[in-house]
Image (cartoon, helix red, strand yellow):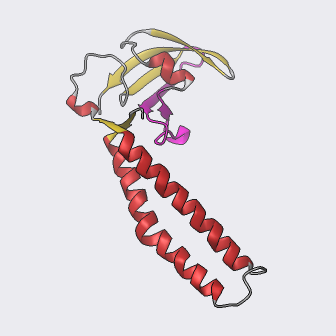
Amino acid sequence: MDKEPITVKGLENLKSELEDLKNVQRPKVVAAIAEARSHGDLKENAEYHAAKEQQGLIEGRVLAINDLIARANVIDVTKIENDGKVIFGSTIKVQDLETNKEISYRLVGQDEADVKKNFIFYKSPIGKALIGKNKGDMVAVNTPSGERNFEIKNVQYI
């Protein structure tokens, strides 16, 4: 069983989601199944089958979250001395050398990754290219849309 790195905030979010699934979503689905059962014949009862499917999805997610929490290797970057090196959990400000646009990325675990928030998976092409580099380094990244070149402007452990 391999340990999965996760940020402190990522672990909090997983625990919060788990509590919601167990204490809010699960009871709603159980009530929906009971309601649908009271309508009689289950073979042609669409409400019953939809509720059972929802229950299966919830139980699958509960198992997945429990597994992630069990394998979690929580990394709190705020407790690590910042020497300007890009590590898991760090926030990196880079400048795209083709567009001169500055972008901030945060390297996170797979479950925390969210492109809209610029939280990128540390094993993604950009994540792999940035890890281990230092402030001021030039980085070439092979992405599905072609090669992109960045300069690392700042590395924060926040």
The residue lying at 35 percent from left, 46 percent from top is: 11
Q: Tell whether 142 sits left or right of 80.
A: right
**Quadrant, the N terminus:** top left
The residue lying at 59 percent from left, 63 percent from top is: 56
The residue lying at 44 percent from left, 51 percent from top is: 65
Above or below, 46 against 99 in this view is below
Residue 73 pos. (x, y %) = 33, 36
Q: Tell whether 78 sits left or right of 4.
A: left
Quadrant of the rendered image containing residue 131: top left
Q: Is residue 10 visible?
A: no
Above or below, 18 against 89 in this view is below
The residue lying at 44 percent from left, 35 percent from top is: 109
Q: How many marks?
A: 0
Quadrant of the rendered image containing residue 44: bottom right
| Front-lying residue, 78 or 18 | 18
Q: Is residue 122 visible?
A: yes
> What segment carries the magenta color?
97-122
